[in-house]
Structures are given as structure tokens and as C-alpha cells.
Amino acid sequence: MTEDEILSEFRASEALLEGHFKLSSGRHSAHYLQCARVLMNAERAGSLARALAQTIPREMRAAIDVVVSPAMGGLIIGHEMGRALGKDAIFLERPEGIFELRRGFRLEPGQKVLMVEDVVTTGLSSREAIAAVVREGGEVIAEASLVDRSNGSADLGVPFFPLIAINFPTYAEEDVPDDLAAIELTKPGSRKS
């Protein structure tokens, strides 16, 4: 898929929103990508996952044992990546604020993991999810995401393969421009804090 085709899918599904948003990272933005909307159609989700899988070098794809994604945002694309790669897909949850495997999911010691996210902005959630996989005995060999909106600054500690990079500006709370601050704030993400 080309960048224009990918953006067209986001626009067609009303997944590219404009306003004043507080992102899961705590940063503010005039744009929000509601990946759940672009992934709500199973055919589109599968197509995006197949395109995302192709961004990962063949030898790395062959080394993957299991796909892991953080709930909520990474859940659908993680599942579809598992299907695209022919691997099991499991997910992490934060029942007490720290990622962990639940629901009987487990990793075998040294199991090679592909971490899959919907959107990476600062990389904080990804690093927390990667740390959880390590605590569970797995080894994250790469991360893939639908969107990189970090302006290339996210350091995940592993190779990173986004389907598309969208560089909408984000702002720390104290640096929000006046014109953006004048718009009512919306917090559409799944994190409470």
C-alpha cells in the first residue's frame, strides 16, 4: 500500500480526527488517529496488517515465534498481524497500571516476540510493553506499528517498522499554542491518566 492509500483508508473510516486532543502519552495535538475506526472493518484491518508485515525484513519475520500487543490500542492490529504472519497473537493488559500477561497467556523462556502497536508517539507505552515481555521471559526482536507519529524520535531499543510516519506536531501541556488551547480538550485514548 502507498502512503496515499493508507491515509485514504484513515480518512474514509473517519479515523483521522481534528480538534484538541490529549494523547495517551500526555502530549497535546490538533490531530488524533482513532485506529479502532480504521480497523473496525475486518477486510481493511487484514489488508493493513499484511502491508505492515511486509515492512519487516523476511529473515526477521521468519524468526518471530509470537506476536504480542498491548491492550487496548494494539489488540486488533496485533491479532491481524498474527494472522498475516501465521503466528499466535496474545496481548498485555494493565489491570493495576503495569503491563502483564493475563487470561492464561504465557511466553516460553527466550521466545522471540514481535511487539505490535497501533500508534507510537513517544514510545513510552511500547517500552513499558517490551519490559513486560522481558519480565515474562520473552525476547522482543522488533516492533511494528500502523503509525509512527514520533517524528522519528521514538527509541524503543529494538528495530521499529511502522507502516506510515505521520508527523503531526504534539505539545507538552505547558507548550500548547493559544489557538489550540482555545479548542475544547478531548481525551479519546484508552488510558485514564
Image (tube, rainbow, N blue to C red):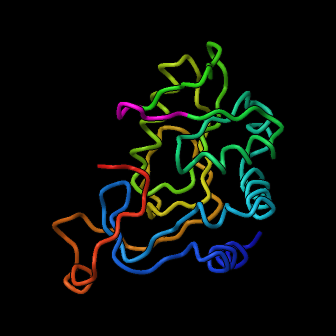
Q: Position of residue 151 (x, y in %)?
A: 45, 64
Q: Is residue 88 left or right of residue 103?
A: right
Q: Residue at x 29, y 72 (%)?
A: 185
Magenta range is 92-98
Q: Is residue 95 magenta?
A: yes
Image quadrant of residue 106?
top right
Q: Residue at x 50, y 23 (%)?
A: 134
Image quadrant of residue 168?
bottom left
Q: Is residue 129 left or right of residue 98?
A: right
Task: Determine the residue located farthest toward the top in the rendered image.
Answer: 109
Q: Quadrant of the N terminus?
A: bottom right
Q: Residue at x 66, y 20 (%)?
A: 111
Decide whether the magenta segment is chiefly helix, strand or loop: loop
Q: Is residue 131 above or below residue 111?
A: below
Q: Residue at x 33, y 76 (%)?
A: 20
Task: Determine the residue located farthest toward the left in the rendered image.
Answer: 174
Q: Is residue 37 magenta?
A: no
Picture mark count: 0
Q: Is residue 149 above or below residue 77?
A: below
Q: Position of residue 124 (x, y in %)?
A: 39, 45
Q: Is residue 85 above or below residue 164?
A: above
Q: Position of residue 169 (x, y in %)?
A: 37, 73
Q: Position of residue 11 (x, y in %)?
A: 62, 79
